[in-house]
Image (cartoon, grey):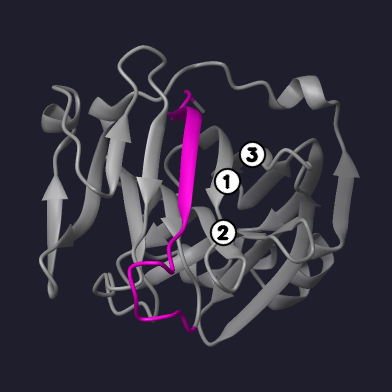
Amino acid sequence: MSLSRLICATCLTLALAGTALVPASAMDTRSPPQAGSFTLQEPQARLKLRLVPGSTLATGYHSPFYQQNPATGAIILRTDGLQPSIRGQTAPATVLREGTAWYFQQTPADMNASLHIDTWPSDQRVIIGRIQSPHGAVVELVADGHRSQVTVTVHDGSSTHNIVAGTIYPDRNVSYAISSRPNGTLVVVVNGSRSVLAMPMAGTASVMWFEAVAGQTGWHMPCHGDMAQVTFTSLEVRHPAP
């Protein structure tokens, strides 16, 4: 099958319908987060953004938006309703971006994470992971506390597709995996539920990064109290040999 067929809108529509279940054991991601392989993006003052390299994170860096438990390695990411937007987003986010960019045609790519949603913001929606390009998000995972589910949002230029990718457990724990392959396949697994997608057109020309996120969406209360907090108990990014 040609790459153009994989990334066409028709194939994307068909792929969005392909959801299946895999054993929960397949979602075990026991490796603690390796902060040194990520760059932190967090607010600095009211209108600035601070970039903290992995070498600094690995020395025990902490702030109101980022903390790592020295005993377990778990990473806490926190937002604040008074944060400035990041890259023009309409709502605040604190981001861990992998250190190396990649083209999906060149390398397989996997991100595996386990997390706990500690605090819901006022609208009960938290971005917990994504594939990002210089032009914006390509694929986002959004946890919805009202519906106890995680949605995959696929951004393809001017259009957006949403599917339900998995259920949030009553204890607010989520395990997910996002996998991209050079043949144009994109697989998302959330708490054992597996969705097979096609890489959207927006991701075919630009470099991309995986991001672990605690991010709010849409309108939010402009106050310190409207915050989201997520604890990543495991986080791993891999680029296995093709």
Residue at position x 75%, y 47% from top?
168
Residue at position x 47%, y 23% from top?
241
Against 34, is 82 above or below? below
Question: From the viewer's perspective, is 96 left or right of 172?
Answer: left
Q: How far apart are marks 1 and 2 (CA)?
A: 7 Å
Residue under label 2 = 120
Against 218, is 52 above or below? above
Disc 2 is placed on an element classified as loop
**Position of residue 78 measured from the top left corner of the image (x, y, whole percent):** 37, 51
Disc 3 is placed on an element classified as strand
Please rate how many residues cluster around mark 3, counting C-alpha atoms within 10 Å: few if below 14, some from 14 to 19, many from 20: many
Disc 1 is placed on an element classified as strand
Residue 231 lies in the magenta stretch: yes
Which residue extends farthest front?
225
Residue under label 3 = 176
Please give the range of residues in magenta.
219-241
Please rate how many residues cluster around mark 1, counting C-alpha atoms within 10 Å: few if below 14, some from 14 to 19, many from 20: many
Of the two numbered discs 3 and 2 in the rendering, the one whose residue sits closer to the viewer: 2
Residue 85 lies in the magenta stretch: no
**Position of residue 227 measured from the top left corner of the image (x, y, whole percent):** 43, 62
Q: How far apart are marks 3 and 2 (CA)?
A: 19 Å
Query: What is the three-letter code of the residue carrying label 1?
Result: Ile
